[in-house]
Image (tube, rainbow, N blue to C red):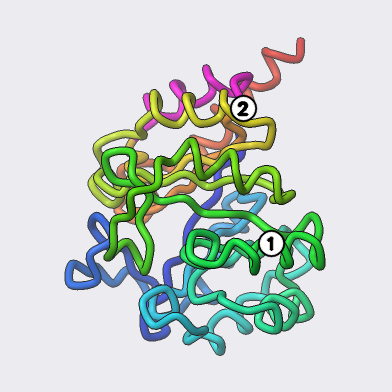
Amino acid sequence: MLLIPAIDLNNGQCVRLKQGNINQVTVFSADPVATARRWVDSGARRLHLVDLNGAFSGEPTNKEAIKSIIVEIGGEIPIQLGGGIRDLNTIQRYLDDGLSYVIIGTAAVKNPRFLRDACSMFSGHIIVSLDAKNGKVATNGWSKITEYEVVDLASQVEDYGVEAIIYTDIGRDGMLQGINIQATVRLAQALKIPVIASGGLSNLTDIDALCAVENDGVCGVICGRSIYSGELDFMTAQNLADAYHNRLLS
C-alpha cells in the first residue's frame, strides 16, 4: 500500500479544503518546497500535487511553485499532478519539466477524445481522477455534480489506457471521517487497473482497513489533512503498511 502525501496549492501556499470547498481553506505552509522535502525525508515514495486554482479556473496557475518542487524533488521519487490540465501541450510541458504522472479530472468527463489522445501520446503517464458525491462524478473543482456513475465512467476510461484511477469521496475529503472503503473496493473490483483511494484518511485504523483490501486492487491512498494536522504520523503509517505487505509476501 503506497501512502502518497498531498500538497494542495492555492495561491502558492500549501492548503487543505473541507469537502472541496474553496471557501473553507486551512493554510498549512507558505513554503511548498519545504513541505515537499519534509514528506520525502519522512519516507514518501510518491508525491501528489494539486493546482487548486487551476482546477477551478481550468488552466495551470501555480506553475512557479510546481516547478520549484520538481527542481527540489524530481528524480528522487515520482511526482503526480492534477488541476487545470485541459490540453496536450500542458501535459507535454509538465512531463518535460520532470513530472512522472499527469492527472486528468474534469477533462476526462467533458472531453473523452482529449483523454484518449493523451493516453495514446503519453502512454504510462496518465492518471484519471474521479471525484464523487453519493456515487455521482463531480467536475470543475468539485463544484458541479454530473449524472455519471463512478463505476461506469471508470470502466470507460480504463479502455482508453489510463495508468490508474484516483477515487475521491468528496463528502469525506478533509473531514477526517475515514476512507469510504466499501465504495473504493467496489470500484477497484470492477477494474483491471489500480485504484488509489482518497478522501477522509484519519488514522492507523484506516491504514489497516486499506491494507486488508490491497489484493482487491486498491494500491495506494492520498494522505492529506490527517498528516498535516498530526492526527496521523506519516512515517508510522507507511511502516505499518510495509509490514502488512511483507507479511503477505512471506
Provide residue 52's location: percent of width, then percent of height. Answer: 40, 73
Which residue is tagged 1?
Answer: 101
> Looking at numbered disc 1 in the image, what kind of residue is underneath it?
Tyr
Mark 1–mark 2 Cα distance, whole angstroms, equals 19 Å
Res 134 → quadrant: top left
First-in-chain label (1 vs 2): 1
Q: Main secondary structure of the magenta part?
A: helix
**Is residue 100 in the magenta section?**
no
Question: On screen, 51 above or below 137?
Answer: below
The numbered disc on residue 217 is 2
Q: What stretch is highlighted in magenta?
A: 203-216
Quarter of the image where the C terminus is located: top right
Provide residue 151's location: percent of width, then percent of height. Answer: 48, 36
Classed neighbour count for the residue bearing mark 1: other residues with Cα under 10 Å, few (<14), some (14–19), many (≥20): many
Res 16 → quadrant: bottom left
> Looking at numbered disc 2 in the image, what kind of residue is underneath it?
Gly
Classed neighbour count for the residue bearing mark 2: other residues with Cα under 10 Å, few (<14), some (14–19), many (≥20): many
Q: Give the residue displayed 70% in from the left and 44% down from the top.
A: 159
Q: Give the residue displayed 50% in from the left and 61% down from the top.
A: 105
Question: On screen, 219 above or below 226?
Answer: above
Could you tell whether 54 is left or right of 118 in the image? Answer: left
Provide residue 62's location: percent of width, then percent of height. Answer: 49, 84
